[in-house]
Amino acid sequence: MINIGEYIDGFNLIFPQSINKAPWEFINDLENTINERISNLSSEYRIENNIAIHKTATIEQGVILKGSVIISENCFIGANAYFRGPIYLGKSVKIGPGSEIKQSIILDNSAIAHFNYIGNSIIGKNINFEAGSICANHLNERQNKTIFIKYNGQLIDTKTEKFGSLVGDNSKIGANAVLSPGSILGVNSIVKRLELIEQIR
């Protein structure tokens, strides 16, 4: 089984619900995890309609937040970003203008530059996505849209049609790169500009 904690330091402590769950299983149940967490947040968060924003976070003009969302301390959300929850942002996460985030976790000190898309993904700590990079979450081009993952030489059937990427800590994703659905990137991964990551063709 793919243990998220092997890719993201301390993940199982932050999200004990993730223990014994595959990444896609955890993401598919993210709504419940976020809602449970919101109910236990401190008064340092402003909470309205299941959207919790830490008082130190900066939200620029035109940002749209839908669904269950947690934005932690010292986060920055650039103008006209679009969030489709459930979403969890760790501490000091930066989301650039015009980016779209859907049903994802992005952890401490990671930066998603302008005009990016992150869908149904788990993004670790200290990760940088340059402008225009994509975490795709759906196999639009295939007849069978179920996502399979190649892991340790074996093919894993996720039994889901919506899963993006698991990106390990300290990784760097270049401008206009595309991570295909089901991409699993280890710690310190480097994806070049314009590169396509497609682990199963």
Image: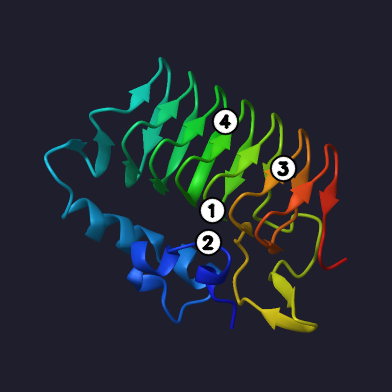
Q: Which-is-in-front pick, marks 1 and 4?
A: 1
Percent across and percent down for residue 164 are 63, 57
Here the colouring is rainbow
Percent across and percent down for residue 180 are 75, 55
Percent across and percent down for residue 148 are 72, 73
- Picture quadrant of residue 100: top right
Q: Mark 1 highlights which residue?
A: 124
Callout 4: SS: loop
Residue reaching furthest top? 61
Q: Amino acid at mark 1?
A: Gly
Q: Amino acid at mark 4?
A: Ser
Q: Amino acid at mark 3?
A: Ile
Q: Mark 4 highlights which residue?
A: 99
Callout 3: SS: strand
Alpha carbon of mark 2 to alpha carbon of mark 1: how far?
5 Å
Alpha carbon of mark 1 to alpha carbon of mark 4: how far?
18 Å
Alpha carbon of mark 2 to alpha carbon of mark 3: how far?
16 Å
